[in-house]
Amino acid sequence: FQTDELTRQYKLVAGPTSQRAEEARGERRGNVRPMVADDLPVVAAFDMPIFGVNREKVLARLFQDMQGRAFVAENERCEISGYLFCKRMGLGPFAAQRAEDAAILLEAGLALSFDDAPSIRIPSTNVDGVALIEHWGFQEQRVLPHMRRGGMGPVGDHTRLYGLYSYAIG
């Protein structure tokens, strides 16, 4: 096994303030809406170069399991520019083209109810993502190596991966 990067796990310790929400709305260049089943092929195609493999079946299953708890961001041309799935205990998977897309998705996700303070796992290579979630009141809980077995090196563009579903399936 080889370490590709570090994965940082955070937990929300300070709820979003109205100032943070205003900042997110001020940066908004697109639109966030609830994900629908017809979005899944486009979301999977968006996700593939970011995560590095085709996860269409995984995303479809998560969508089925998290009805009403998944969002997409669209840019000015109505193209998918990010997505977010929200478990009852946390956020992820979560990917976005730009930090401002991630900010409006995060605002939408944090408006939902959670069983406990939500957590999020984020690759340390996503410096903008780490800054975003820390700004929104998340505090680092632990850091673990993200490892792979063999291969030629890391796959995907994890600088646009804002949250993992789990350590096992990303």
Image: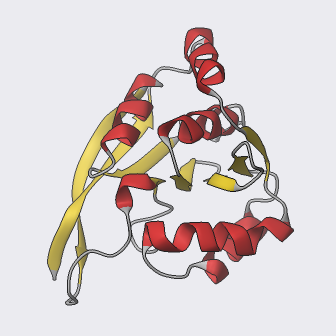
Camera-side residue of 84 and 45:
45
Residue at 59% in and 24% down: 27
Determine whether 9 is above or below 3 in the image. Answer: above
Relative side of 82 to 33, left or right: left
Camera-side residue of 103 and 166:
103
**Residue 170 in view here:** no
Residue at 69% in and 56% down: 80
Determine whether 144 is above or below 91 in the image. Answer: below
Total numbered circles: 0
Looking at this rendering, what residue extends furthest in the top direction?
Answer: 19
Residue at 63% in and 34% down: 104
Asked which quadrant contains residue 58, the reply is bottom right
Asked which quadrant contains residue 11, the reply is top left
Relative side of 125 to 46, left or right: left
Q: Position of residue 72 (x, y in %)?
A: 71, 51
**Residue 59 in view here:** yes
Q: Position of residue 25 (x, y in %)?
A: 66, 22
